[in-house]
Image: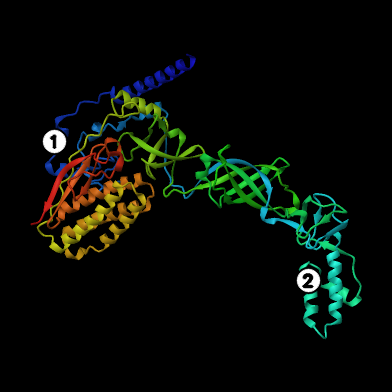
């Protein structure tokens, strides 16, 4: 009950703050305006016409064109457009001060890093492990290395071995030496037999020169390292190939960390890990990830992440516990970071407010955004805001409460929609456009349909391929076939097509591809209406539920609806909005 009371008190405080701001916003009335102030000539009205974008009302300019954000046609801004937009809340300077609103301009980071904490152990490098074996059978007469953990050098004496087979081989060598003039190959074979048993050439020469049989031979190490297991004792009879000692070189070690399943997406080979160990509290070591285990442990749901490190002065020892920090570089094409304090959460939606530039009074636009990875006390934003926009970092909840009281779109009033303005009339160049240009435009639409079909299949890789084919077809269109205003209009629309199509090609996420496909479709629809396509019927189809019920159009060669914005989820959602038939 206490928690409920706190929540209700907080919500009541926000509403009271909103009511106070509402009073500052809407409770004041201005002075009387005389009739003379409204007397303007028709020329004056045309000169002061302002154009804006129906989807981005913050865009204002004195002449027509396209929106620099979404490339939709700009529309004339009426005198009441600001108050009719339920996404925008206008505030007085006093209200801004009362709400303690703070803002910041969004920047694009060249790289973003996410810090992860991992724990693990120092382990021996398996590639540096070796076994010292007996190359001939015999009996251990003496051991020169007697305990586990002893450091041995390459070529160091390990044991003394008595071997009847070696004594027999020495007799064969001396007998073969006597007959070397008769059968020199016999002497060579006797020497080779001893060499295969790892008897050093110097020892063989000594046997030949002294002509004395050695009863014991010394076994020397083949590699350097630490003895991890002594398998024999004095007096043991051993077989050929039997392991005498297990050795490992500790000059280079593995650092193996446990990475949880949910963190694996942010860890890549090559990422740097700084780590410490309780055994050496004042030292920090660094390694880079060289291997990520492809299989999760089914019990702990972790995967082994491994790095390597040179063990200078032998400070690090196997089985030491370590704790590391991974600096994971996030690979996102455009990294837009916003502070956590700027975001309002409404369950499945994330909302923030954008301060509109160049307004006579402070104006704040409601935006729904798609969040990506969390980076410290910030979040990556995948869509909804762009670099250079000014967002509210403190005071968003107060703005939202005021918008709710004014029956504008807010966290609780999601059903409010923007009133769509009438768009500018599409220019008609059909009569002056040659058939050759119309045929090239028709081929471009055919390439566009491949992009549409790939989105219907919800296949981002195939969409990328189809977008590449669209770009190739776009480059074949000859603008010299038209001139004057039609040519200028073509160049303007071609920039839009190239930009949106390139964004489709670069994106790996199908939802991002679909967002750019909408604007690509709008531009292409305008083109075929302006220039015409010879002898071809196309259907402009519309899905009213696309992009959170905002709706979106696309072109189709078939009357049957196949929705590119939802694919199999809502394949038949939509209807034929318009039929375009141009030509004989």
| x 31%, y 31%: residue | 89
Task: Specify whether residue 566 is in view.
Answer: no
Task: Specify whether residue 393 is in view.
Answer: yes
| CA neighbours of label 2 inside 10 A, class few (<14), some (14 to 19), many (20+) | some
From the viewer's side, name the closer residue of 150 and 438.
150
| x 71%, y 52%: residue | 311
- Report the coloring of the rendering: rainbow
From the viewer's side, name the closer residue of 540 and 90.
540
Q: Earlier in the sequence, mark 2 or mark 1?
A: 1
Q: In the structure shown, which secondary structural element does the residue marked by tag 1 occupy?
A: loop
Q: Which mark is residue 39?
A: 1
State which quadrant residue 13 falls in: top left
Q: Which mark is residue 193?
A: 2
What distance separates the C-alpha of mark 2 from that of mark 1?
119 Å
Q: Name above or below for residue 283 compared with residue 342.
A: below
| x 74%, y 49%: residue | 315
The mark closer to the camera, 2 or 1, is 2
| CA neighbours of label 1 inside 10 A, class few (<14), some (14 to 19), many (20+) | few
Q: Residue 422 at x, y = what percent? A: 17, 40
| x 58%, y 45%: residue | 326
Q: Residue 162 at x, y = what percent? A: 87, 61
Q: Which mark is residue 300?
A: none
Q: Residue 569 at x, y = what percent? A: 31, 39
Q: Name above or below for residue 96 compared with residue 451.
A: above
Q: Residue 212 at x, y = what percent? A: 92, 72
Q: In the structure shown, which secondary structural element does the residue marked by tag 2 occupy?
A: helix
From the viewer's side, name the closer residue of 277 and 160.
160
Q: Name above or below for residue 344 compared with residue 583.
A: above
User: Residue 439 vs residue 253: left or right?
Assistant: left
Residue reaching furthest to the left: 584
Q: Quadrant of the C terminus?
A: bottom left
């Amino acid at each position: 009950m206490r928690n409920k009371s706190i929540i209700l008190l907080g919500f009541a405080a926000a509403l009271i703050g909103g009511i106070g701001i509402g009073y500052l916003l809407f409770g004041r009335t201005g002075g009387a305006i005389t009739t003379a102030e409204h007397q303007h000539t028709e020329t004056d009205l045309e000169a002061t016409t302002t154009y804006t974008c129906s989807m981005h009302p913050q865009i204002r300019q004195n002449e027509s064109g396209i929106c620099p954000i979404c490339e939709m046609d700009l529309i004339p801004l009426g005198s009441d457009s600001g108050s009719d937009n339920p996404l925008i809340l206008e505030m007085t300077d006093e209200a801004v001060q009362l709400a303690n609103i703070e803002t910041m301009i969004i920047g694009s980071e060249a790289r973003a890093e996410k810090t992860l904490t991992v724990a693990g152990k120092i382990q021996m490098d398996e590639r540096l492990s070796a076994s010292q074996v007996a190359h001939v059978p015999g009996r251990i007469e003496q051991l020169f290395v007697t305990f586990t953990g002893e450091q041995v050098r390459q070529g160091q004496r390990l044991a003394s071995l008595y071997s009847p087979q070696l004594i027999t081989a020495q007799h064969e060598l001396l007998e073969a030496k006597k007959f070397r003039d008769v059968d020199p190959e016999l002497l060579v074979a006797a020497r080779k037999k001893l060499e295969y048993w790892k008897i050093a050439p110097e020892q063989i020469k000594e046997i030949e020169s002294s002509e004395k049989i050695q009863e014991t031979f010394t076994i020397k190490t083949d590699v350097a390292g630490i003895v991890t297991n002594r398998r024999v004792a004095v007096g043991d009879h051993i077989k050929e190939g039997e392991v005498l000692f297990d050795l490992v070189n500790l000059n280079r070690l593995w650092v193996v960390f446990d990475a949880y399943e949910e963190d694996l997406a942010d860890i890549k080979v090559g990422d740097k890990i700084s780590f410490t160990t309780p055994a050496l509290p004042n030292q920090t070591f660094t390694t880079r990830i060289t291997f990520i285990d492809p299989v999760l442990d089914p019990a702990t749901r972790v995967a082994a992440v491994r790095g390597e490190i040179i063990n200078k002065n032998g400070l690090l020892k196997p089985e030491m516990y370590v704790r590391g920090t991974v600096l994971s570089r996030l690979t996102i094409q455009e990294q837009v970071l916003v502070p956590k304090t700027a975001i309002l959460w409404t369950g499945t939606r994330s909302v923030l407010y954008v301060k509109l530039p160049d307004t006579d009074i402070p104006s704040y636009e409601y935006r729904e955004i798609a969040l990506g990875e969390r980076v410290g006390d910030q979040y990556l934003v995948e869509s909804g805001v762009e670099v250079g926009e000014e967002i509210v970092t403190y005071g968003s909840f107060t703005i939202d409460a005021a918008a709710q009281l004014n029956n504008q779109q807010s966290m609780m009033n999601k059903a409010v929609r923007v009133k769509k303005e009438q768009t500018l009339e599409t220019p008609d160049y059909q009569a002056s456009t040659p058939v050759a240009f119309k045929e090239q435009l028709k081929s471009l639409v055919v390439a566009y349909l491949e992009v549409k079909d790939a989105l219907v299949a919800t296949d981002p890789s195939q969409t990328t391929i189809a977008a590449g084919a669209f770009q190739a077809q776009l480059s074949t269109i000859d603008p010299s076939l038209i001139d004057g205003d039609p040519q200028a209009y073509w160049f303007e629309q071609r920039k839009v097509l190239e930009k949106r199509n390139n964004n489709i090609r670069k994106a790996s996420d199908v939802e991002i591809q679909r967002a750019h496909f909408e604007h690509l479709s709008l531009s292409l629809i305008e083109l075929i209406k302006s220039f015409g396509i010879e002898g071809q019927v196309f259907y402009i189809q519309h899905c009213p539920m696309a992009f959170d019920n905002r709706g979106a159009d696309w072109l189709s060669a078939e009357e049957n609806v196949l929705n590119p914005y939802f694919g199999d989820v809502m394949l038949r959602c939509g209807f034929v909005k318009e039929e375009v038939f141009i030509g004989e």
